[in-house]
């Protein structure tokens, strides 16, 4: 008995337009159940066939830009190991109190995007690492502080001078 897999419109879109980006179990399920999803698959095939090749590539980009799940990537905090030192540290062991820089990492479910945040005493540096070189411009939303920043060059960090709380990050792809 084959268990039923939950299939979304996005899965059907990927099945037709970019099967390499669809999870193998969903691809196999859709392949085996084409008749069940015939209407949806046929609609996507019609769009694909009418969009042409490279000449109408902007149509495909237009469609991708309209689908919010292709534009927004939710990043999750990564669990880091705590390195506890053995021994006792006395309060008077250091003459100067200084805040150590701390860092946090956030990644999407597929690990295609990584945001590394390094907080120091004076500022916060936000780095974006991505495998997707086709998009160069992003908008990053930091929650719960509701701060938003635009990234035009992923090779440079964003410097945040204010104190903000970051528990969740939403990354939005912007048009080229």
Image (tube, rainbow, N blue to C red):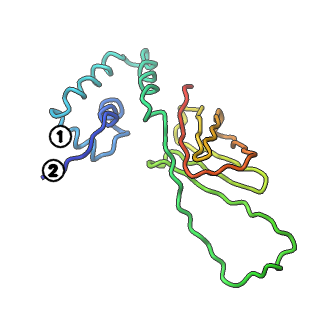
Side of 158 relative to 12 (left or right): right
Side of 147 relative to 161 (left or right): left
Which callout, 1 or 2, points at the residue further toward the start of the chain? 2
Q: Residue drawn at (53%, 32%), measured in percent from left and top? A: 134
Disc 1, disc 2: CB below 8 Å?
A: yes
Q: Residue drawn at (69%, 43%), measured in percent from left and top? A: 157
On the image, the x and y values in percent for residue 147 come to 63, 41
- Above or below — where is 8 with respect to 104? above
Disc 1/disc 2 C-alpha distance (Å):
10 Å
Specify few, some or many for label 1: CA neighbours under 10 Å numbering under 14, 14-19, or 20 or more: few
- Above or below — where is 124 with respect to 140? below
Disc 1 marks which residue?
A: 32
On the image, the x and y values in percent for residue 126 come to 66, 46
Q: Circle 2 sits in a helix, a strand or a loop, which is it?
A: loop
On the image, the x and y values in percent for residue 52 come to 36, 16
Disc 2 marks which residue?
A: 2
Between 75 and 146, the residue placed more toward the observer is: 146
């Amino acid at each position: 008995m084959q268990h039923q897999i939950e299939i979304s419109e996005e899965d059907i879109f990927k099945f037709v337009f970019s099967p390499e980006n669809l999870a193998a179990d969903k691809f196999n399920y859709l392949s085996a159940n084409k008749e069940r999803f015939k209407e949806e698959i046929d609609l996507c095939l019609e769009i694909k066939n009418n969009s042409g090749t490279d000449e109408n590539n902007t149509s495909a980009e237009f469609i991708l830009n309209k689908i919010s799940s292709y534009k927004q990537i939710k990043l999750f905090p990564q669990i880091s190991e705590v390195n506890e030192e053995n021994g006792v540290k006395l309060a008077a062991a250091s003459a100067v109190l200084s805040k150590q820089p701390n860092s946090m990492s956030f990644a999407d479910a597929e690990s295609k995007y990584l945001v590394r945040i390094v907080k120091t005493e004076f500022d916060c540096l936000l780095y974006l690492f991505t495998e997707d070189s086709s998009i160069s411009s992003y908008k990053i939303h930091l929650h719960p502080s509701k701060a938003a920043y635009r990234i035009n060059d992923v090779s440079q960090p964003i410097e945040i001078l204010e104190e903000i709380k970051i528990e969740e990050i939403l990354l939005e792809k912007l048009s080229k």
